[in-house]
Image (cartoon, helix red, strand yellow):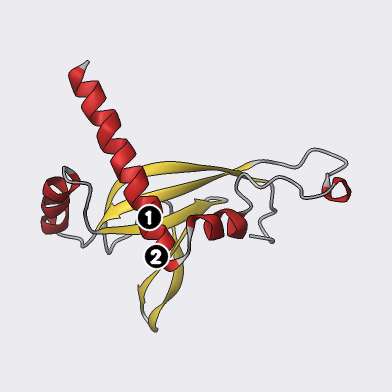
């Protein structure tokens, strides 16, 4: 039971940290607006006449770097609510993030949880979006 509580506490700390880190480049509210996560219609005229498909939106958290150093550092720093993480947003079967690309820094996509530049740690549900693939 104590182990389960520690795991839940660590997961909550990571969630808080990941959301706060996301807010440094694109605030959590911005992520919600960008992907329509948890967004309710603002007027009755925006209420859809037929139910829209709800697509899950997931924040994938990676330890920085492709070697074990990033993971080791984060294991230590996580206990005090800190760490160095790379974040990516997964929606419609693709994962989107910002980082180094072949043509320089910029946005890129890959298969979910498959970044070759960082080590996957965990996923955090951000809710669902009713936006279409094209709108996203």
Query: Quadrant location of residue 4?
Result: top left
- CA gap, disc 1 and disc 2: 7 Å
Q: Give the residue drawn at x 21%, y 54%.
A: 83
Task: Tell me residue 132's x, y (percent).
Answer: 70, 54
Question: Considering only vertical position in the picture, is 11 above or below 81?
Answer: above
Rendered image: mark on residue 62? none
Nearest to the observer: residue 24 or residue 66: 24
Q: Mark 2 highlights which residue?
A: 24
Q: Give the residue drawn at x 25%, y 24%.
A: 5
Residue 113 seen in this snapshot? no
Rendered image: mark on residue 20? 1
Classed neighbour count for the residue bearing mark 1: other residues with Cα under 10 Å, few (<14), some (14–19), many (≥20): some
Q: Give the residue drawn at x 49%, y 55%.
A: 28
Query: Quadrant location of residue 8?
Result: top left
Circle 1/circle 2 CB separation < 8 Å? yes
Task: Tell me residue 133's x, y (percent).
Answer: 66, 56
Q: Secondary structure at mark 2?
A: helix
- Residue 123 shown left or right of residue 85 in the figure: right
Q: Give the residue drawn at x 30%, y 37%.
A: 11
- Residue 16 shown left or right of residue 119 in the figure: right
Task: Tell me residue 93's x, y (percent).
Answer: 53, 50
Nearest to the observer: residue 118 or residue 129: 129
**Residue most toward the top?**
1
Q: Secondary structure at mark 1?
A: helix
Nearest to the observer: residue 105 or residue 30: 30
Quarter of the rendering occupied by the N terminus: top left
Quarter of the rendering occupied by the C terminus: bottom right
Question: Considering only vertical position in the picture, is 77 above or below 108?
Answer: above
- Residue 113 shown left or right of residue 94 in the figure: left
- Residue 125 shown left or right of residue 20 in the figure: right
Classed neighbour count for the residue bearing mark 2: other residues with Cα under 10 Å, few (<14), some (14–19), many (≥20): few
């Amino acid at each position: 039971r104590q182990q389960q509580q520690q795991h839940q506490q660590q997961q909550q700390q990571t969630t808080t940290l990941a959301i706060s880190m996301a807010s440094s480049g694109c605030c959590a509210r911005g992520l919600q607006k960008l992907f329509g996560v948890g967004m309710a219609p603002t007027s009755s005229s925006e209420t859809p006449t037929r139910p829209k498909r709800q697509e899950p939106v997931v924040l994938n958290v990676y330890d920085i770097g492709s070697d074990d150093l990033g993971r080791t550092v984060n294991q230590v720093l996580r206990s005090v609510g800190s760490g160095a993480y790379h974040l990516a947003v997964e929606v419609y079967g693709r994962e989107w993030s910002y980082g180094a690309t072949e043509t320089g820094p910029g946005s890129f996509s890959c298969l979910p949880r498959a970044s070759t530049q960082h080590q996957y740690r965990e996923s955090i549900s951000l809710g669902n979006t009713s936006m279409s693939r094209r709108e996203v």
